[in-house]
Every structure is written in C-alpha cells, then in structure tokens.
Image (cartoon, rainbow, N blue to C red):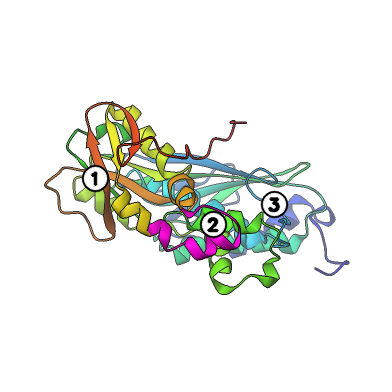
Amino acid sequence: MPTNAPTVADLDEKGLLARIFPRLGTANVLLGPGDDAAVISSPDGRTAISIDTLVQDADFRLTWPSGYRTSGFDVGWKCAAQNLSDINAMGAVATSLVVSLTLPGTTPVAWVEDLADGLAGAISALQAVGCSVVGGDLGRGREIVVTAAVTGDLQGRAPVLRSGARPGDILAVAGELGLAAGGLAALESNTAYTDMDEALRALVAAQCRPRPPLRQGPRAAAAGATAMLDISDGLVRDAGRIARASDVGIDLDPAVLAPRAARLHKEAAKVGADPLNWVLGGGEDHGLLATFPADAVLPEGFQRLGTVHDGGGVTYGGEAPRTAGWDHFAG
C-alpha cells in the first residue's frame, strides 16, 4: 500500500460511503442505503434474522505469524459467508445484509473498498440470489469491527430448529470439515505464507474465504430435516447443541470422519497438528449439520455422519471425543 494512500481519516462519512455504496448490489431491495432504514420485501410474511461479528485480533489478524496479510476482501467475504450460513441453517434463503463498520482513522480507504468488494463477491460467488447489502453504519474505534445482520425468507416452509432431532434419526453433513481449522493452524504457524505449497495455501483460503453450502439448507428442509444448524464452532460442539436442544444423544461415525481427517494428514504434518482435531473441532468451514428420519433419502450434497439415540451428549464411535470445539470465552 503506498504511504500516501488515503485513510478513512482523510474522508468524512459521506465521502467514505460514496466509495462503498457503488460496490454493493441492489437485488430485491425496495429502498436501499441512504435513508434511516432500508426497506426489503418479505414474500413469506415471516423473516428469519441473525447477526454476527468479526473483531480484529479476536476473529482475524491484519498480519498473521506466517506473514499473511488479511485483506479487506477476506474480511468482507467471511462476514457475508458466516451470516448467509446462519440463514441457510434455518432452511431459509437470505434477502439482505445490514453491515456496521468500526474503523480506526488510520485504516486505508482502499482496504475498506476491498471489504465492500468482498461482501459483494461472496454474495455472488456463493449464489445468494436475491440478497444484497442494503445499509449499515460507520463508526470510529481503536480496532476494526465488522458486524452484519442478515434477514432471510422461509419461502413457505417451517423453519428447521435445533430441537427436532429424534432417536433413530440419521445425522448428516453438507460441506467441508476441517479445512478452515487447517488454514488457521497454517496462518498461526512459523511457516512463512510465501513458502507454503499449494495445499497449505488452499487451507488458508478456506479459513479466510469459507464457502458454506447455501443451496443445501432449503433442500434439507424440503427433504424433511428434523433439526439443523451451521457448524461454526466445531462439529463436536455444534452436534452437542442439537443434542441438548433435542434431549437426545449423538454418536459420530469414525468410519466417515477418520477418512476425512486422513485426507488432511500431509498438510497437518507440515504444521505439527492432528487432522482429526481439525475435523472434529474446527467449524469455520460453515458446513451444515442436519438430522433426518431413518428412512429419508438424503438430499444431494449430504453425507451420513452418525446416528441419534436416546440419552445425551456427543460420542465418537461410542467414546468421548478428543476435542470440544471452539468457545469464545473459554480459557
């Protein structure tokens, strides 16, 4: 970045917004940015809504130990992806994003423009048809904080909750497991990003720009999914959330998960990690975890992962799993 490149402190709020708004889409927006509130359509008559936050040095680093520099595009993409995934997990389709930015005055304007491009780029690449950024807020602070609220349309279906799993159901997953966790390990490692091979760089990309399976949520709902959620904090932890909400037990199948871990063995060895921990404890791929009746035909893109039974908690092949997943406030 040139040393004379403008920062947000060089612009007023109006000037910065003028740099951002043209980069954002306007799909299905009745009234977009510019007024005190946006207006969006709600064909179903019900609105699914969620919110998520990315905080500098808690959820991402501007410069990682590996030397990788987080771009605005990375942060914008990840912000959109994790919010779109939450709506997907309800069986709904996203209709809008409202984004709040807190920025230090030293933040380069180009970085913020890149963030807007990342938001729009993820919406387009992940095929969130009918969704766009409809407004938000700007504020000044000591660190970069990006918060987005997302709305979704249920399209006439009942929302799929975490509390509907029943003994005898099949547990299934759509999307990746462990890639983003591998990317985090690579970013935090002493291996310079410039020296990483293509396989490690692919894991870094999975961490910085996850690709949740957005088509699968509505498909699962239409196929009779009894419970569903976005895997954001790790397979074990999030399966436990279904187990608690549904008052059931869940057993994860090593015959399915061990091969997934084995495919990551070479990359894990490069950074001194256990790939099974990535698969069981990593969540930022934003895969989709769902339960289905035992006689259900799983929708395209889902793989059977385990079973639901009477009891409680989560086991891995009948034993306690080796990792609990991510907790924001754990020591």
Q: CA distance from mark 1 to mark 3?
A: 41 Å
Depth order, front residue of 224/128: 224
SS for callout 2: helix
* Quadrant in the picture for residue 7: bottom right
Q: Residue at x 47, y 37 (%)?
A: 324
Q: Residue at x 37, y 40 (%)?
A: 47
Residue where numbered disc 1 is placed: 156
Circles 2, 1 touching at the beta carbon (< 8 Å): no
Find residue 179 and name its label.
Answer: none
The type of residue carrying mark 1 is Gly
Depth order, front residue of 313/34: 313
* Quadrant in the picture for residue 315: top left
Q: CA distance from mark 2 to mark 1?
A: 38 Å
Residue where numbered disc 2 is placed: 182
Quadrant of image for the N terminus: bottom right
Residue 214 location (% of width, % of height): 37, 56
Q: Nearer the viewer, mark 3 or mark 2?
A: 2
Which contiguous range is marked in magenta? Answer: 260-275
**Magenta includes 98?**
no
Residue where numbered disc 3 is placed: 61
**Magenta includes 264?**
yes
Q: Nearer the viewer, mark 1 or mark 3?
A: 3
Examine the rendering and report whether any part of residue 259 can be seen.
yes
The type of residue carrying mark 3 is Arg
Give left or right: position of 89 versus 55: left
